[in-house]
Image (cartoon, helix red, strand yellow):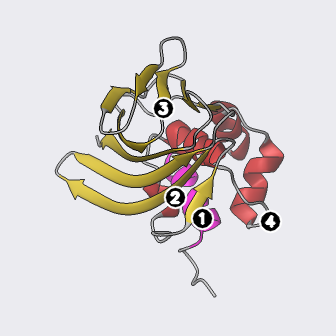
Amino acid sequence: MEERGTSLGDRLRELRAARGMSLSELARAAGIGKATLSGLEHGTRNPTLETLYAVAGALGVPLTALVREQHGEPVRGSAVTATLLEVFDEPGVTFELLRMRVRAGVVQHSPAHAPGVTEHVTVSEGVLRAGPDGAPLVAGPGEHIAWAADVPHVYGTVGPDEVVATLLIRTPRG
């Protein structure tokens, strides 16, 4: 059983309160329903990866500020399943290293992250199409792509094969 102050709902409530935001304000800023956000705070809803990124972006924090103790536990989105491998905190910046799989035939639309966030993907298997919503990039095995993730962006595959890749998210603090 989780101790008080360590659950996703507790961290979410603490971050929201620290920013002086009401439940309605954060739900609106994240583009999600107030009932969904309330369910997350009370532990009655399981978030998707898209929802977690939307809330983290609206709060201006890296994803790991919400799910820090969940190393090794996959989080699923409509196309992407991501597993947090490591978090690196350096002066002024946080790096989140994730292993991800992107299911073939599905496109995941991710909301904008906080200003200054960048994403860096190195593909191991399959062909990935990812990046800014209007201008995604393509990478195959052994290739790397990167983009400013403070705009809506997408993840999908090219062809019938699943993509296996590593994702490094760089989030400036300040």
Locate residue 135, reporting x and y percent.
48, 12
Name the mark on residue 129: none
Which of the two labelled residues, at mark 4 and mark 2, occupies the earlier sequence position?
4
Q: Residue at coordinates 45% horizontally, 40% vertically from top-left?
A: 60
Which residue has dot 3 on it? 128
Residue 80 in the figure: left or right of residue 83: right
Please state the extent of the stretch shown in magenta in the rendering.
7-21
Front-most of residues 80 and 5: 80
SS for callout 2: helix
Which of the two labelled residues, at mark 1 and mark 3, occupies the earlier sequence position?
1
Q: Residue at coordinates 51% horizontally, 28% vertically from top-left?
A: 112
Locate residue 165, reporting x and y percent.
42, 46
Which of the two labelled residues, at mark 1 and mark 2, occupies the earlier sequence position?
1
Q: Nearer the viewer, mark 2 or mark 3?
A: 3
Q: Quadrant of the C terminus?
A: top left
* Spatial separation of the CA atoms under disc 2 and disc 3: 27 Å
Packing grade of label 2 (10 A; few <14, some 14-19, many >=20) is many
SS for callout 4: loop
Which residue has dot 1 on it? 8
Disc 4 residue type (three-letter):
Thr
